[in-house]
Amino acid sequence: MRKIETAEEINKRKQRNQLIVGGILILIMVVSTAGFAFFSNPDTNTTQTTEKINYNGLEFERDQNGLWNFNIQGQAFSTVYNPEETKDIQIGFTSSINDFYNKPFYYVLSNTEASGEIERNIGIYAERTQEICLQGINWQNCTSEMAVKNCTSNVFVFRETSQLNTTNIYKQENCIFIEAEYPEQVKASDKVVFKILGVQ
């Protein structure tokens, strides 16, 4: 037989039940919020690793854009390839940043990305950069607006070749010729950048 409860006992039981249900709801909200924060925060569930290499005493660090950043004497540089990736490309001449410092340099294009590597890293030291028409080259598409230069000026000549897996980088007077398959010209340009900056 059930005990007859007074109105006061009924109210106490209802309040106790409401407190228990409220406590359970609060606990569920806290746990779900904590779980969401823990599992959705990339800093807690994944470690961001930065790719780095050390080459000839310089630290190369890859950024979120895929460029390799490095510093020489406080000056920042960035390349698509790192020196480990270009070390097998041969260059048979010497050149330094002093050859370009505060002087104009010019380029003959077949690949704007490749010339962009040179301009981004060596162009910061140049007086100016400009696309030109080089005397004696019959494969270049010159326009009447282009200045005509010869190899007494600093000129980078980018030429696409059809020879597979062949990169040829050489110098005639002050002209540096970068001849390679189109996709390899950026890598060859980075090799030239490393050579001029004394990295390789």
Image: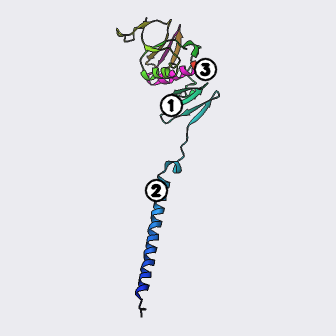
**CA distance for labels 2 and 3:** 51 Å
Check disc 2 and report the residue beneath it. 36
> Can you give x and y, in whole percent of width and height, for residue 16 in the image?
45, 78
Determine contact: label 2, label 1, CB under 8 Å.
no
In magenta, the rendered stretch is 173-195
Within-10-Å neighbours for mark 3: few <14, some 14–19, many 20+ = some
- Asked whether, in this view, residue 54 is left or right of residue 146, the answer is right
Disc number lying in front (2 or 3): 2
Residue for point 46% across, 61% down: 32
Query: In the rendered structure, which amino acid carries the disc numbered 3?
Result: Gly
Q: Residue furthest bottom?
A: 1
* Front-lying residue, 148 or 16: 16
- Asked whether, in this view, residue 21 is left or right of residue 58, the answer is left
Of callouts 2 and 1, which one flags the residue occurring earlier in the amino acid sequence? Answer: 2
* The N terminus - image quarter: bottom left
Under circle 3, the secondary element is loop
**CA distance for labels 1 and 3:** 19 Å
Query: In the rendered structure, which amino acid carries the disc numbered 2?
Result: Phe
